[in-house]
Image (cartoon, rainbow, N blue to C red):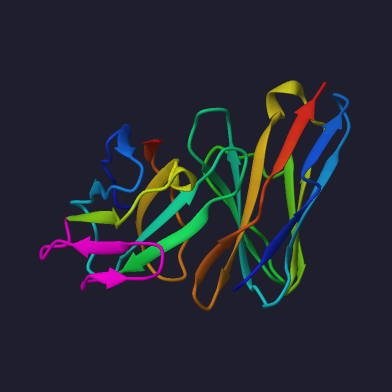
Amino acid sequence: DAKTTQPNSMESNEEEPVHLPCNHSTISGTDYIHWYRQLPSQGPEYVIHGLTSNVNNRMASLAIAEDRKSSTLILHRATLRDAAVYYCIPGGWGNKLVFGAGTILRVKS
Amino acid sequence: GAVVSQHPSRVICKSGTSVKIECRSLDFQATTMFWYRQFPKKSLMLMATSNEGSKATYEQGVEKDKFLINHASLTLSTLTVTSAHPEDSSFYICSAEDRAGYTFGSGTRLTVV
């Protein structure tokens, strides 16, 4: 399993963009980069995933470095509902997801 | 989107008893499901991979005789915590693989008293 390094915590102001970084230098060539988030006492929620190209969906954008050793999850306008623990998880499609420590995102109003 | 239902959401049991947690994929078939446990302020720890019609694959250090997993149909996997003790108190979460990725249940808070 590829190891990941994420900041323990980050803080953002409401309505401002947030960039959540993740280093995954040992990622294999076939591993996708999955991002999930978890609110307290809930199961994780899918945010976005990608392989090589940058990805956009209604929740966020995912910027993947050219060497794939790092990625950045971008929330374009943070809201209070985005306060959660964000997990970056490299993994093959169809394989188990192994969670790291994640980043606690706090959003200030 | 895909929905995974987990039941019960909370359960309190006496030490020494067994507790069964159900995980259902509501609108898709899941040949593979995953079971995690999470302690307060910690990340999710993968316990086992549940495969429909075959034995579960347990992660290192997880006691298969204590955490019984049954995946008898394409929409249901169960986790039974046998002879529960207070140290088994935790948040248990299941996940199922669907066409778009992985969907998680809402979790089961187990308290053993």
> Can you see residue A15?
yes
Q: Position of residue B43 (x, y in %)?
A: 48, 37
Q: Quadrant of the C terminus of chain B?
A: top right
Choose between A13 and A19: the one closer to the eye. Answer: A13
> Can you see residue B82?
no
Q: Position of residue B112 (x, y in %)?
A: 79, 26
Image check: A72 left or right of B55? Answer: left
Q: Quadrant of residue A108?
A: top left
Q: Is residue B56 above or below residue B2?
A: above
Most extreme residue toward the left is: A66
Q: Position of residue B53 (x, y in %)?
A: 72, 72
Q: Residue at x 40, y 46 (%)?
A: A86
Q: Residue at x 60, y 40 (%)?
A: B37
Please state the extent of the stretch shown in magenta in the rendering.
A51-69
Tell whether position A61 is magenta: yes
Q: Quadrant of residue B28?
A: bottom right
Q: Residue at x 75, y 34 (%)?
A: B110
Choose between A50 and B32: the one closer to the eye. Answer: A50
**Chief secondary structure of the magenta span?**
loop
Choose between A42 and B51: the one closer to the eye. Answer: A42
Q: Residue at x 31, y 38 (%)?
A: A12
Tell whether position B13 is magenta: no
Q: Quadrant of the N terminus of chain B?
A: bottom right
